[in-house]
Structures are given as structure tokens and as C-alpha cells.
Amino acid sequence: TFIFEIKDNEKDPHIINAETEPDGVYLLGCRDIATGELLSQEELDDIAKHANLKRPKWKKVKFGDLLEETKTVNHEGFVVYDIETNDAILKLKSPFYTVKKWFMRRNNDFVFRANYKQLVDEEYYGVIRELRNLYSELTWTSMSEQEKGIAFENAMNSFADEKRWL
């Protein structure tokens, strides 16, 4: 049994627009139906090469190092696999992804709540202040999820460039 992901940013936009992988069909896994065993990432790469399929990027890394890396990446995160059984163990979502998704999909008025500091981590206080400076509450609530995502990234980038988070 083959496991695929379909990436189509036009019909199903991702939270992270800057992901560089092109749209298409990605081979994520393959299970031997006779034994129930999953193929390794190396075996999946080999199948994908011969069948002209796309594969997500992957690497072997110590779990502690991956936890540290997850804190600073600007993409969705990582899927952790057991190196012996090839089973997916867990997904590590990056703070950037989870907060951006929260900004995009949460109740529209939260950016303008007086208690926003109770809702997000302190590194995002400046982002909310920036969004409040750039948009009225009426404008913000009328924006689509994708427009809010772009606004969030622009606000994040302005603070990252100027090193003025708080």
C-alpha cells in the first residue's frame, strides 16, 4: 500500500507559502501488505527515483538536535520516524507554523483583544502591535485566511529585520 500527499497550493493553500517544494504527488510511505512492515526512507527514495515520483526532504538526526531546530525553522515542522521500524512516531510542528496558523484561522477579533498577551508567547507581541498599526479591526476581520497569513509574515519579517520583537 502506497501513501501519497497531494500538494496543490492553488486549490488547497498551505499555511506556509514559502515552502519551496513544487506542487505534485509526493511518495510518503509504503507498507508491505503481506508483512505490515513499512519501507525505509532510503527504499522510498529508490522507488521514487525509478517511478519518477517526488519525495519530501528528509535526514537522520538526533532527536534533541531536531527539537532545537524545530524552534527556529520557518516551515511546518518535521515527521519523526522510528529508525528500526520505519513507523511514524510523531509530528513536530514549528512555533512559526502553529502561530501563523493561529493568526490565520482563529476568531477574527483576537488580534484586537485587550488580553492578547495571554493568548500568544511574548515574541509575538510586537507582531500584534504591528498588525494593529497596519490594519483596522474591520479590515482585519474582512481579510481571507491567506491575506492574514501574508500580513502575519510581513509583520514577522519587519521585526526580524529590525530585531525589535518586544
Image (spheres, rainbow, N blue to C red):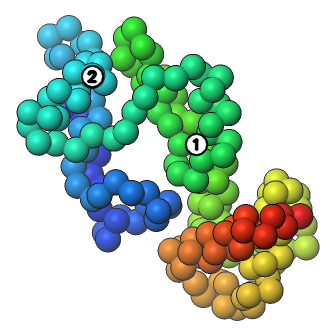
What x and y, as percent, mark residue 6? 27, 52
Q: Measured along the vertical axis of the image, is residue 36 above or below residue 162? A: above
Identify the element where label 1 is drawn: strand
Disc 2 marks which amino acid? Glu
Q: Nearer the viewer, residue 51 or 97?
A: 51
Cα–Cα gap, marks 1 and 2: 24 Å
Residue in view at x 40 percent, y 33 percent: 58
Kindly identify which residue carries mark 1.
Answer: 93
- Left or right: 77, with 49 as reference point: right
Q: Judge the density around disc 2: few (<14), some (14-19), many (≥20) Cα neighbours within 10 Å.
A: few
Residue 156 makes an appearance in the image? yes
Disc 1 marks which amino acid? Lys
In the current view of this chain or complex, which residue is farthest to the left? 51
Kindly identify which residue carries mark 2.
Answer: 42
Residue 1 makes an appearance in the image? no
Mark 1 vs 2, N-terminal side: 2
What x and y, as percent, mark residue 44? 23, 27
Residue in view at x 58 percent, y 53 percent: 74
Would you identify the image quadrant in which residue 2 lies? top left
- Left or right: 86, with 80 as reference point: left
What x and y, as percent, mark residue 135? 72, 88
Identify the element where label 2 is drawn: helix
Q: Measured along the vertical axis of the image, is residue 108 above or below residue 71? A: below
Q: Nearer the viewer, residue 26 or 111?
A: 26
